Image (spheres, helix red, strand yellow):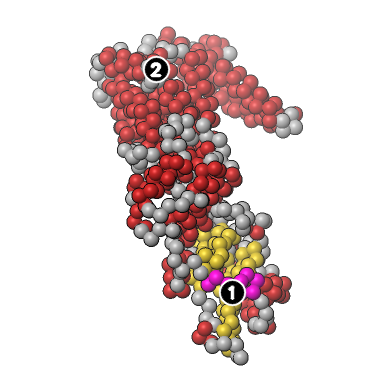
Amino acid sequence: MLSAVNNFHNYTRDALYSLLDMLRRDLLSIELITMACANITSKGNEGMINFTINQTAAEVEALGKHVILWVETMQEILEPGLANRAGRTRDTTKILNFVQKFTELHKNGFDDLNSFKEFIANTRSLLSSAAPVGAFIAAGPDRILDPESDEHRAIVELQKSMTQRLNFTEAQIEFAGRNNMLAQLESYYLQNVDLHLMFQKDNFLDALETMKKNMTYFKDEFIRGCKSDTSQPDKILISLEQLFYYQCPLPTKEDIAIYVRAQKAFRLFEARFRNREFFKSQFYKDAKQNILTKITITKAYGSITQLENLQIVAENDVIEAFVKIVDFTPYSDFCMLSVVNNFSNYTRDALYSWVDMLRRNLLGIELITMACANVTSKGNEGMINYTIDQTASEVEAIGKHVILWVETMQNLSWPENLSWPEIPIEFSKQALGFETIPTTSFNISAAIVRNEFEKRGPKEFYQVLISEAKEKDVFWSVLTDGDPPTENYASFTEFNGINCHIFRFQGNPLNRAIESKKWFDQNKTAIWNVMKEGVHGDTSETLLKIHHNAGPIYQNGLYRTVILFRNKAFFAMNAYLEIGQGLCDVQNVNATSIVDFFVNGFHAHAWRLYLLL
């Protein structure tokens, strides 16, 4: 068909291009119909659909590549050099497209897993788009670029992007120089990943210079790095696989339980000493974190029991006693995610910082991998495609496992039931200290607890209420639509003279906040009347009456949790409810509504109902 059209139209370019455009449209239609047929005939069988995708893609690609080669060959015969110029223009465009894609996937700032997920999802397309970069390096120094050419501009843009975004050595190594487990792993990471990547990045940038001036040495040095036992990309990738994949089993409830139990043992141990300054020393903190990490990762229940029963009266004897509890021999086969999580006290930002570092390093590996593949294979398309598939599979495996690991840890960090030893609750207790909390500090204490929850687990909206420690169902009761009930609510009670209640809501609750406020305005009087009728009852009985007679007070799309407090005293001034609040709003719409009721008879009664998203 190509020959016939070319001959019939006297070798005119537009006639041939018109045929190519018709072919393009027909192939698009074939691809669309193929997928529709595959879905119907296979009855949604994913395996059959994927087989059809691969088979059709291979046939369309083979046809398309042959047509492109046929046309370029004909153009070269008719006008020598024309096809080469066209090819170089396409390569220039591809490099600029790669720089744009690389820049988008290498955004500055990192506040959640979305950037990492986006990067992993684009692994194969990024690797494929990097192929022309390697082709440019493979061609140098035989092709010296004109400083005014588009190709030269593309190379300059690539160098600029690489220099700005692949600064591996700028990673913040928080614990470097200390004698602890994380410092050991960070040192390993620096020596086996960062330094080798930096070495090859510099070689890569130097190799790009061969396109602007005749410097064969730079290209040769880059090739040597591609073949080195230490700095070739797949060797660096092996180190990352060990640290973030093979040595990183998914977190379990047992991991959380043993970690919190160890933290509690330390808290109770420290409470026995009056001199708290000793426990602020870096020496003590490192020893404590080493023990916590080894206890958690090796599940050393015996060491926890020893810690819980430790009898020491002098601070000087603490470290010696610690050495007897746990072996301080360095470990080299720990999971980086687990160690970072332990040493940062399960704070989200510390873990995300390392995930971001991993993202940047994997981006660098992908770029250098494609450059090396093109140079070392001398442009062999089969070898380059094999490298793309192999590298993409390894990067995707690491990335998907890291995402699953982090999300599993976040889900486990929220209390599953009231007796579960939750991480944020334990750290809240540590932050609140050891002394009885006066009512004047209730609001401050609520803010402290809210901060401890916000630093850990997924990014949710948390609200905290603190009251005096009193009996449940008599002086306070809670109802929630959570399944289980603790899905949206957690508490710790009778701690330092307080009861603490934590509530969370997820996603974008603005519409729910608006609708809840409308519902509350319509039903506030009915709620108040039921509270008035039950003024002499207990909170559990009255709350159920409110729910059934004036509600439902929690329901789908509106408030999800309600809590009722009451107080009773002979004198009115003593009946006042002291409740600390750490509340929030949703885009200037209240996330909480409150109903107060007070009556002063023979006894004074104070009631307060909170309705929370």
Res. 230 image quadrant: top left
Q: Give how far across and how far down residue 350 sits, in percent.
A: 42, 45
Of the residues under marks 1 and 2, which one precedes in the sequence?
A: 2
Q: Nearer the viewer, residue 460 or 449?
A: 449
> Residue 410 vs residue 324: left or right?
right
Q: Is 279 situated above or below 474?
A: above
Disc 2 residue crowd, few under 14, some 14–19, many 20+, Cα 10 Å: few
Q: Give how far across and how far down residue 592 sits, in percent.
A: 54, 68
Which quarter of the rendering shows the N terminus?
A: top right
Q: Give how far across and how far down residue 439 sits, in percent.
A: 46, 74
Magenta highlight range:
468-476
Judged by its main secondary structure, the magenta piece is loop
Which quarter of the rendering shows the C terminus?
A: bottom right
Residue 530 can be seen, yes or no: no
Q: Please name the residue shown 47% across and 17% down the image.
A: 384
The three-letter amino acid code for the residue at tag 2 is Asp
**Residue that badge 2 annotates:** 229
C-alpha gap between disc 1 and disc 2: 68 Å
Q: Is 530 situated above or below 348?
A: below
Secondary structure of the residue carrying numbered label 1: strand
**Residue that badge 1 annotates:** 565
Q: Please name the residue shown 52% across and 65% down the image.
A: 495
